Image (spheres, rainbow, N blue to C red):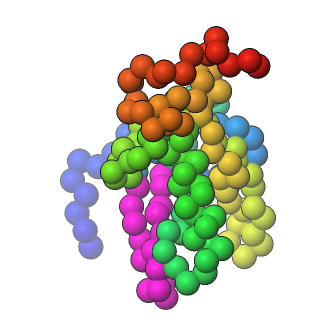
Amino acid sequence: MVQLPGFNAGEHESQNFDVLPKGDYTVAITESDAKTTKAGDGYYLKFTLQVLDGEFKGRKIWDQLMIEHSNVLAVKIGKARLGDYCRAAGKNNPQDTSDLHDIAIRVRLKVRKDDEYGDKNEVQSVRWKETTKPNVGALTGEKSGEKSAVDDDDIPF
């Protein structure tokens, strides 16, 4: 038996883990970690994303990106997705995954059907937040916040 002095269940809301409807969401990476695969033959990044606005504000989504493994295609897909997160966050050369934290980005979610474990959300694509332009510094290698030599008026489209 474990004593629970001062605990009041009425002060703690239940968390909802139902899948979110497919669609686009503004999120931020709030946590990141490197995990070893079950077989011990590689590692992946695990990102926790939090919805920043709308009906599902505060809800969490998880994404896993294979970074090192014998499955070359899985690594290619994982590193491409990591590149998407970096560009969306305006961090072309992050030194640590924490460099990607707390920056508003957009993700498109889909629902993957799973009869054994229940349906779950998967990140289908990552892009910069629609209300802003992509960080030009991320595309040109400049540090975020520096003035870019690219002028929108010089772009013919």
Q: Is residue 98 magenta?
A: no
How many marks the image carries: the answer is 0
On screen, residue 36 above or below 150: below
Q: Where's residue 123, x and y in %? A: 65, 52
Q: Is residue 45 visible?
A: yes
Q: Where's residue 68, x and y in %? A: 48, 74
The magenta region covers: 32-48
- Name the one closer to the observer, 24 or 92: 92
The residue at the point 39 percent across, 24 percent down is: 145
Instruction: Determine whether, in the image, residue 121 is placed left or right of residue 8.
Output: right
On screen, residue 94 above or below 34: above
Q: Where's residue 125, x and y in %? A: 68, 48
Q: Is residue 43 magenta?
A: yes
Q: Quadrant of the N terminus?
A: bottom left
- Name the one closer to the observer, 126 or 48: 126
On screen, residue 113 above or below 111: below
Q: Where's residue 117, x and y in %? A: 68, 72
Residue that protrudes farthest toward the top in the picture: 153
Main SS, magenta region, reads strand
The residue at the point 77 percent across, 72 percent down is: 115
The residue at the point 46 percent across, 80 percent down is: 42
The residue at the point 21 percent across, 53 percent down is: 5
Instruction: Determine whether, in the image, residue 52 is placed left or right of residue 5.
Output: right
Q: Is residue 90 visible?
A: no
- Name the one closer to the observer, 72 or 121: 72
Q: Quadrant of the C terminus?
A: top right
